[in-house]
Amino acid sequence: MTTPKTTGLHHITVQTVDWEASLRLYRDVLGMTVAAAWGPKGREMALLDVGDGSHIELVAPKAGASADAGLLTHLALASGDVVADLEPVRAAGYEVTMEPKDVMLGDMPATVAFFKGPNGESIEFFQTR
């Protein structure tokens, strides 16, 4: 039996509570481009290019779904400069829940910061040092 060999992360799905607010954050504030979009009005979906072949798949809320149905709770985005990347997020009015902080993850030094997305998801900027 052959073991599958993955080549990286393709996408993470975020079930939105507010489609327009989610699209504004990921596209307009964080600068991701829409690689593909599909679905009828009210069930829109979009694949946003994060870089390095990775994507976030935004999915519009299902009619009648609870506000926490299928939400991603934590998303870490690689960053080259956590402090600089956090500024447009702060300027756009998103709640910063943890200011940039240097941490050690085992033998890996990193700088991290967290903020809340429009769906209640915790978004982290992660920079290895």
Image (cartoon, rainbow, N blue to C red):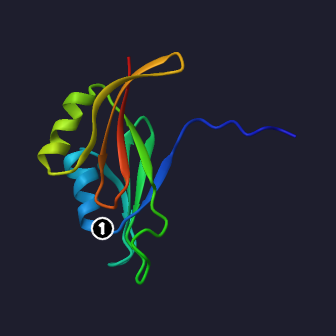
Q: Please give the residue where the numbered disc 1 appears in the rendered image.
A: 19
Q: Residues within 10 Å of mark 1 (few under 14, many from 20)?
A: some
Residue lying farthest to the right in this orientation = 1
Q: Between 72 and 53, which is closer to the camera in this rendering?
A: 72
Residue at point 16% right, 37% down?
87
Above or below, 51 relative to 40? above
Q: Amino acid at mark 1?
A: Trp
Instruction: Give residue 84's position: percent from left, percent from top.
Output: 19, 30
Where residue 47 sits, quadrant-wise, is bottom left
* Coordinates of residue 15 in the picture (x, y in percent): 42, 64
Quick one: quadrant of the C terminus?
top left
Q: Secondary structure at mark 1?
A: helix
- Percent position (x, y) of residue 114? 32, 41
- Residue at position x 22%, y 29% in the image: 83
Specify whether 115 is left or right of 87: right
Nearer to the camera, 116 or 79? 116
Count of labels shown? 1
Residue drawn at x 48%, y 49% is 11
Which quadrant of the figure has residue 1? top right
Figure check: 80 above or below 2:
above
